[in-house]
Image (spheres, helix red, strand yellow):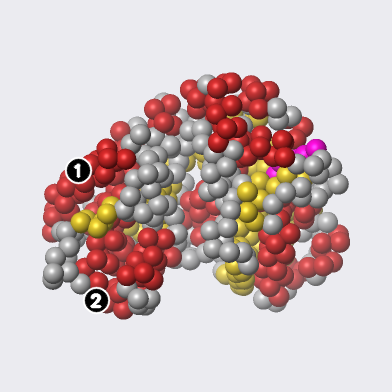
Amino acid sequence: MIFLGVDIGSSGCKCVAFDETGKKLSMQYEEYKTAPGALNLPPELLTKSVFSVISGCIAGVESKNDIASITVSSFGESFVPVSKAGKPLTDIIMYFADKARSELEDIVDAVGSSEIMSTTRVLPDTMYALPKMMWTEKNVSEPVWKYLSIANYIIFVLTGETVTDYTLATRTLLFDLQQLRWADKLLNASGIDIKQMPLAVPSGTVAGKILPVIADELGISPEVKIVTGTQDQVVNALGAGVQSEGECVDGIGTVECITPMFNKIPCTEFTKCNYVCIPYLSGYVTYAFTFSGGSLVKWFRDSLAGGMAYDQLNEGCPESPTGMFVLPHFQGAGGTPDMVKSSRGLIYGLTMETDIFDIYRAVLEGTNYEMFYNLEVLEEFGIAPKRIYASGGGARSTKWLQIKADIFNREIIPVAEEECGALGSVMLAAAVLGCCKDEKEAVELFVKHKPPVLPNSEHTSEYRDLYEKYKNLRKLELSLNEG
């Protein structure tokens, strides 16, 4: 069998083919042709790009008759409003667009922030779908038949079926986490009809067979199954091998996100820190993240280091802690555990002897201090991952991983497969189509790791003192900007 995994991001999409042994056979990636930072994405452009990468990936497979499934995963929060005729009614409003502020206030006033959090285990914010759905209801020219998340819209195009998996459902601010169903009180208060929502099903469910006309267009069998994936960070955790409490993956991409697994839903104070709860295997995961992860490193390279190659920056990077501090709030403290969007980034400790390589290491240290702060806060809620896998572009940097191991004082285990999210999607299909018993067996079959990066005890000791100073600097900056 050959399985295709489609991974839809906010700036581009990819499709990767694996066989039933986990061998990667083909891959295709395409960026959307939109302006950087665009707040809207045309559904037609999304569909064209997704079909382009699926076609390109299929072209790289020798035996198209062996293709058994296509699993679709995507970023969360954003959606496509669809008419009864199956046509998109508006552009996709991206999750980072701070739109529908008044609609958010309306739903919070009607239901109460505490009840919303206890039901959904999500801190109310305009990044989630519900406020934008309420705004859409007021501004479309004809009634919305279905609200479909990005992955679910593509599944609809491929099959004609309207389903969503639980993980993407949680990103709407409309899903009752404990009951695993749409929340009646939130639907009634928002004016959204339950008939407008897709059927919520577990991740790794067969949504249906591919439509014959689409199969002909792609040159594959009409027997190919379309499988529900998950939100991108969740499927990344599966592709990294996270399968038990005490394990997590650190996805070091444009946004850096630690995704740990745990067995019980924490108290709502956890939710107030912007930590969510997402169904995962037999338990849950949450997201501890900073927007200024890989994006900050790229900004430094392009704006301060003159576009210098990463290999050159890593070669010149000092081997020891700098004693400098970079507070990575260059896009605000807009992640976890603090939501202070007016907070600003800092570079502290410059001298006349400081060079560009010193600042580079300080940037890497700052992003890792911020993620270690998240680990500290998570531990206060009983979530203390000890086994940390690393994936994403940053996981290819041994310098970054060594600094991370030294600051975290834990070994960091890189995932061998770079296309971790697509691999996780494929594992869901392999489990549901009988290639393996379940997702945990799929981990044993498909996931491979590189040798761990071990902490340097001398550096760890030095970082322990520096980290306490970092927290003081962080606290000062937030106090200057709160309110």
Residue 437 lies left or right of residue 270; in this view the side is right
Instruction: Residue at 24% x, 76% y: name it.
Output: 316
Q: x, y percentage for residue 153?
A: 71, 50
- Between marks 1 and 2, how big is the CA–CA gap? 29 Å
Residue 104 lies left or right of residue 355; in this view the side is right
Residue 37 lies left or right of residue 215; in this view the side is left
Foreground residue among 138 and 403: 138
Q: Secondary structure under badge 1?
A: helix
Q: x, y percentage for residue 415?
A: 43, 62
Foreground residue among 187 and 245: 187
Q: Which residue is mark 1?
A: 472
Instruction: Residue at 53% x, 58% y: name it.
Output: 37
- Locate the N terminus and report the quarter of the image it occupies: bottom right
Q: Is residue 165 above or below residue 221?
A: above
Tag 1: amino acid: Asn
Q: Secondary structure under badge 2?
A: helix
Q: x, y percentage for residue 256?
A: 41, 54
- Locate the C terminus and report the quarter of the image it occupies: top left
Foreground residue among 196 and 127: 127
Query: Is residue 423 located in the magenta-colored stretch of the structure?
Result: no
Instruction: Tell me if I can see residue 222 in this picture.
Output: yes
Q: Which disc, if any, is residue 35?
A: none
Q: Which residue is mark 2?
A: 316
Q: Nearer the viewer, mark 1 or mark 2?
A: 1
Q: Which residues are magenta?
A: 143-148
Instruction: Residue at 50% x, 54% y: name it.
Output: 236
Tag 2: amino acid: Gly
Instruction: Residue at 45% x, 59% y: name it.
Output: 254
